[in-house]
Amino acid sequence: MRDRSEFPGAEPREARAAGLRRLSRLTWRATQLSAVTAVGFAALFARTAPAQTAVSDATAAAAKTSPPAAAPATSSSGPARPRRARATASASAQSTAQTTARPTRRATARPTPQAAARPSPQATGQTTAQATAQATAGTTATAGTTAAAAPSQPATLAPPTTAPAAAPSTSSAPAPTVSSTSHGGG
Amino acid sequence: MPPATATFAARTFPALGTFATLLVTDPDALEAAHDLLAAELGAMDAACSRFRPDSELTAVNRAGGRWVPVSPLFADALAMALDAAELTSGDVDPTCGQSLVRLGYDRDFAQARRHTGPLRQPPMPAGGWRGVELDRSGPSVRVPAGVLLDLGATAKALAADRAAVVIEGTAGCGVLVNLGGDIRAAGDPPDGGWRVGIADDADFDARTASIEPRQVVVIDDGGLATSSPLGRAWRRGGADLHHIIDPSTGRPVRSCWRTVSVAAARCVDANIASTAAILRGERAVRWLDGLRLPARLVRHDGTVVTVAGWPPG
């Protein structure tokens, strides 16, 4: 039991009411502080969250915005760049295949392993076209037409189907049709 | 397979800060082919020009590290540039933009070469291509703040590839696209193939703005590109500079080769290989041979080395 001397000049009931008001204010401020802290942490985690946390949202966004023709090709033939949360946006099956293939993209992901992991007929067709382009060194009309409609096939440093040949050296031979020089900035 | 034809029609016009030459084996298709090529070049310029304030590249470079939505074409060009970096272990690095700016190549080349005063800032190494993020599903791009992309090494070659493929698919005839020396042929060639002069920039005649080819070769299809530190060279503060940058130093590379020409399946592959060969110096001979990429390499004294089936000469 408290001694009245703690609250000089105040009635016990008034002192109790004053204490409750202070406690109420403190509780309210603590709640406000918690809310601000929670928002701050949420923002921080949203910027640094691992990829898996954003897959579902990103997939929905990609489904709305990606052109139908380009979407399968981008994930099948497009390079798997260093990606953060939003960079995993793609159809979920493709996303899984890509994540699996990412560490060894150059060595193993092109073209067969990705095709095997990819369920979509479009993706399979794209990969087949890619393999055709590689096999024929990008010179057939089939490979060319496919490349025109979809993003370009990744660079491979593939050799030509035939090496350049020496032109006839007779004096009657016509002049070159074009010249290759770096003067244009190459 | 239709019989090869000996005739073709040609047109040359300025584009992408250089020239574009279009050859088609069906003269009736020239006009339509020209329109397709001009459209492709216009789109590539709007996407990838480092000197246009309204280009996508400028928007990406100015984004200060934020994600920027881009067109599929820009994503394509960037993906190719990052492929080039990966295939060459970073020798051909698209993040050399800041290096070029520090060296005075901060505007259209014709204007940049007029300034000959000393440089204001020291060279700056490439920003690091592994820090560039490309989301192809959007598509969108994020470049670390302070890093400037320069897609000039691959975008022009990619444009040649794309245009040739589209023209061949649309017109159904043989086509050759030459963008300042970056060449792509597609479809059935004319009788006897496409004759290509291989020039050495040391022979450039400024009075006539022309180069006498050192060798003439014939190609049927695929890509062919030539790189040289002599091609785009300028002087600042008494120092000779050029546009092929060593990413590790931010300085123009000092190569044992003055000109490298490479043939490959596509122009962009040839361009990547020829640029990397300049940067790799002596190691380039074995590297190109291992890739079976026919190439002609010219030393500063004029000595020629050919590899992987490139005809001697």
Image: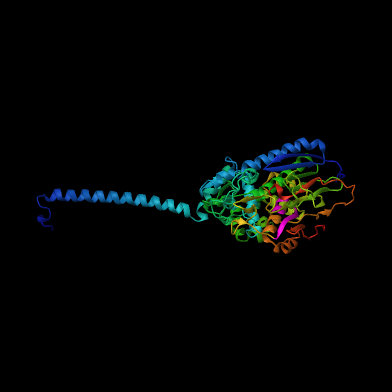
Tell whether B66 sits left or right of B279.
Answer: left
Position of residue A170 measured from the top left corner of the image (x, y, whole percent): 90, 50
* Residue at the extreme front: B238
Say whether residue B66 is left or right of residue B185: left
Between residues A60 and B66, which one lies in front from this camera angle?
Answer: B66
How far across and down, in percent of the image, does residue B180 sit?
72, 46
Say if the magenta span includes residue B267. yes
Q: Which of B259 and A88 is in front in this view?
A: B259
Q: Position of residue B13 (x, y in %)?
A: 73, 39
Q: Can residue A90 be seen in this view?
A: no
Instruction: Choose between B135 and A20: the one closer to the eye.
Output: B135
Please provide percent x and percent y for residue B135.
58, 50
- The answer, for residue A180, to whether it is visible in the render is yes
Residue B165 as seen in the image, left or right of residue A80: right
Does the magenta run of residues contain B172? no
Q: In this view, does B73 lie above or below A5?
A: above
State which quadrant residue B163 falls in: top right
Count of marks, rendered view: 0
Q: Which quadrant holds residue B285? A: bottom right
Q: In which quarter of the image is the C terminus of chain B?
A: bottom right
> Which residues fall within the magenta stretch?
B256-271
* Front position in the image: A138 or B288: B288
